[in-house]
Amino acid sequence: MPIKVAIIGAGSIGFTRTLVRDILTVPELADTTFAFTDISQHNLDMVTKLCQRDIEANKLPATIQPTLDRRQALADADYVLCTIRQGGLEAFQTDIDIPLKYGVDQCVGDTICAGGIMYAQRTIPALLDFCKDIREVAKPGAILLNYANPMAMNVWACNTYGGVPTIGLCHGVQGAHWQITSVIEQWAKREGLLDPEAKLHRRDVEVIAAGINHQTWFIKVQWRGRDMLPQLLELFEQHPTFPTTEKVRIDVLRRFGYYSTESNGHLSEYLPWYRKRPEEIEQWIDLSSWINGETGGYLRVCTEGRNWFETDFPNWMQEPPAIFTPDKRSEEHGSYIIEALETGRIYRGHFNIPNQHHITNLPDGCTIEIPGYVDKTGIHMPVIGDLPLACAATCSVSVRVQEMGMQAAVHGDVTLLKQAMLHDPLVGAVCNPEEVWQMTDEMLVAQARWLPQYQEAIPQAQQRLAELEHSGKRVHLHETQGAARLHTRTVEEMAQHREAARANAGAADKGNMTR
């Protein structure tokens, strides 16, 4: 009997087309039924046409059932994939621009920091609605595989309040694993341990990464049985480009002794040290790519990617259909987890799960990211033990921010929301308490349409801001585009950035449910 895979937010071209291809690469899953659901009929139609054309070109029996009716899509589903961006680009813009007026300069703004905390306020109520539908109409035991950020808070809420087993999936570990493989390969060639033409795959370098999503740390790195951790700093410093593009990550490696899974831009906004002084920010970022620290860089790339979705669809339909072969299968975990559960082939990856004594110096119940393996009997996660103290300390601060943000989103608690903002590492380094209180009120008012749990509280926030304005007690606001934003670009530079963003469109298009 074919399995049914429901994709919520299927209007996301990058994720949906990739996940369909990945799943149908597995011979035993060739007859999968895909249920696509989205709130945009237009986007749903485009993605369905592209995916249907790919399926027909590969002569597979798989079927697609597109619908705007979420419960219909979820009915009898074995697996549910979630790729939404609640509030779309309109809400995302306020996640970046409002905090910037208060001095909070973010590159991505989707995990913690002011933008990530507000993103959770929008997303968690939607996810809990999805969980209710999954409990009521999907097959018993259906698993929710979540790609939507903010990963840790979302997975925490679904497992605690949603009543649906939820696994969070992210490709940050894979990307950083490739970086580590690259520096080891270059070192091994210099030392004569590899032929000049040899290429290492990340499978050749054994790693264990553990922590929380986007703050996961490589606590074990081995190549040919050799412990490479003591050499990593030297190897990264000798790399031809990483000292320019990964300044924050290398500095943290220098001071902590462990490399972080997340990009330079991401990591810089989770810590209180690198983006708090505008005059110093440019020392830590690189504008050759948005992910290296550009102010609002992810927002820019998502916006450009969405424009191409509209203008390039006819061109995509003219291109040859995708051919489903193993060499074209992506490294996204979702299809491999489904394959392992359905066929028994063992898959090892890094997944986001509730901490149940797995990392012993982080709180139980919080969402952690650790290695695990999957087979026909289920998803199995080992005990890691203690994280190194510096890594645990950094994660612990973020975990408490995530906990307050998650609980605020579930209960519509404005005070707890403001306390989460106050304790965020970068927000706290930049803002005083009154600035935090006013910034949060402004964000609540701006995002009111996506915050059902705050409907009674938002008029009060609006009134507070009006009274402060009237009395002259409004805090000083900055007129700035950010210390690390691309201001003006030549035509040639614009073309180069568009091509780079096009190459990243699959990742950037994440969560098209409301875009």
Image: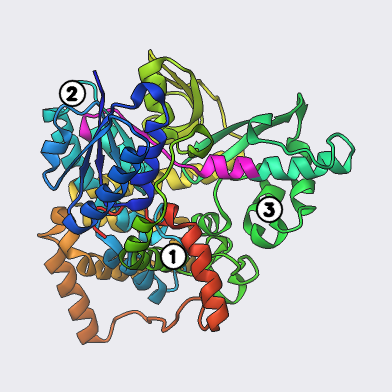
Residue 171 among magenta residues:
yes
Residue 301's label in the rendered image is 1
Looking at the image, which residue is at 45% across and 47% down? 398
Residue 229, by quadrant, is top right
State which tag comes first along the sequence, 3 or 2: 2
Amino acid on which the number 3 mark rests in the picture = Ile
Q: Which corner quadrant holds the N terminus?
A: top left
The image quadrant that residue 181 belongs to is top right
The secondary structure type at the circle numbered 2 is loop
Quick check: 62 above or below 235? above
Q: Where does residue 224 sit, x and y in percent of width and height?
A: 76, 26
64, 39: nearer the viewer: 64
Question: Residue sitting at 40 percent across and 24 percent down?
Answer: 27
What element does badge 1 sit on?
Answer: helix
Residue receiving disc 2: 139
Closer to the chain start, of discs 1 and 2, is 2
The residue that disc 3 covers is: 250
Spot occupied by residue 198 in the image (x, y as percentages of width and height)? 78, 38
Q: Are marks 3 and 2 in contact (CB under 8 Å)?
A: no
